[in-house]
Image (tube, rainbow, N blue to C red):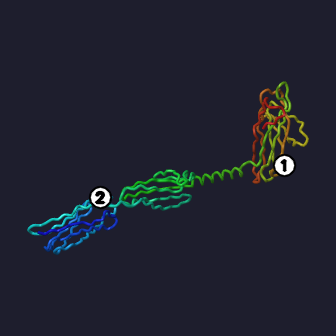
Amino acid sequence: SPSVSVKTSFPASIDPRKEAVLTVILENLNRKNLSDVEVKIRSSLFNQDLQISLAPLERKAVEFKSTLDPFTTPRDDVVRVSAFVIDPVTPHQFEAIPAVVSVQPYGKIVFEPTKEGAFLESVTRVKVVNSGNVQLVGTYTVPGGFFKSLVSSGTPDFEKRFVNGSRVFSWDVSLGVGETSEIVLVTNYRLPFFLLLAIIAGFVAYFLLRSPIILVKSAVVVGSHEGGMSEFKVLLEVKNRSTRVLKNVNVIDSCPHLVEIVREFEVGSLRPVSILHHANRGTLLKWVIDEIEGREERVITYAIKSKLSILGSLDLPVAIAKFDTIAGRRRSTSSNVMRIGLSSNKGHMFK
């Protein structure tokens, strides 16, 4: 009768990315010539047959080569090997001891970033690939400070973390075998850029369009009667804050009906060109200044007194300065409203 020894020489583990080589050693244990021997390998991963012959007492090593799916998941595979001696009368089967072959885990999460640029905008697209045969988790980070976080958005949302003392945007990605994903980071500086432009334009417009004349109105109590205020000194400070000469400057002030103008003006003080009584606005005073040099300041003073003793407070309306611009247009600017009360110390100026 035929007698065959079947043994295996398998690697303990195999890499599914490489060709698997399984070696079966067969030995004819008697002097009978076995011309037709069928060797079979069976498992969840391997299923191969091979026809060989064995001379009397011959020992032969047979290799089975197989290519696995690269994404075969790690596992322990029990491989069984059988040798069948074909005989029309009495076929014989010989078994090897089952062997265990392990499939190795391998791979990592691969990040493939590409960048796209536009005006004040940066778009980073990151292709995320699981290059292994097991589910893997990877972390992708990019530098991201506080200001950048205000103008950036991510799909999916990023987490702000500190890595080695530096701020970063971070994504944790989990992918199954063969899966892919995408991370998108958009950084848009357009809004802060246009906001900065608007602020600069606002400052420029302010300095270009603001009135070159500053008109400040102030007053001091110089006399009292029966416990109330009775006499006041009013000052109008006219200042050209530009470097250009301003011509034909007219200063117009008004006093309420409750008070009247003291027509005795201080020596050296600019006298009004007209003093008129208005039915609604009280007394109107007008001064004319031919021109004011750049950065020059003029002070106009006059005195008023009340017809009655004022026990509460007195509001003096705004004064107005009108002047000609370089373009020949007529412009005007107003002063502050000035209020004097009994709580004011005598001789103290209020603006």
* Lower position in the chain sequence, tag 1 or tag 2: 2
Where does label 1 land, which residue?
290
Image quadrant for the C terminus?
top right
Residue that sits furthest to the left in the current view: 89
Secondary structure under badge 2?
A: strand
Residue neighbourhood size for the residue with mark 2, other residues' Cα within 10 Å, grouped as few (<14), some (14–19), many (≥20): some
Quick one: 201 or 97, which is closer to the camera? Answer: 97
- At 21% from the left and 69% from the top, the residue drawn is 26
101 displayed left or right of 140? left
Quick one: 347 or 103, which is closer to the camera? Answer: 103
- The answer to whether residue 64 is above or below residue 73 is below
- Expressed as whole percent of the image width and height from the top left, the position of residue 75 reads 31, 58
Where does label 2 land, which residue?
76
- The answer to whether residue 129 is above or below residue 309 is below
Secondary structure under badge 1?
A: strand
- Expressed as whole percent of the image width and height from the top left, the position of residue 212 reads 76, 49
- The answer to whether residue 52 is above or below residue 100 is below
- The answer to whether residue 239 is above or below residue 41 is above
Image quadrant for the N terminus?
bottom left
* Rendering quarter of residue 64: bottom left
Q: Amino acid at mark 1?
A: Asp
Q: Amino acid at mark 2?
A: Asp
253 displayed left or right of 56? right
> In the drawing, what numbered circle is on residue 113?
none
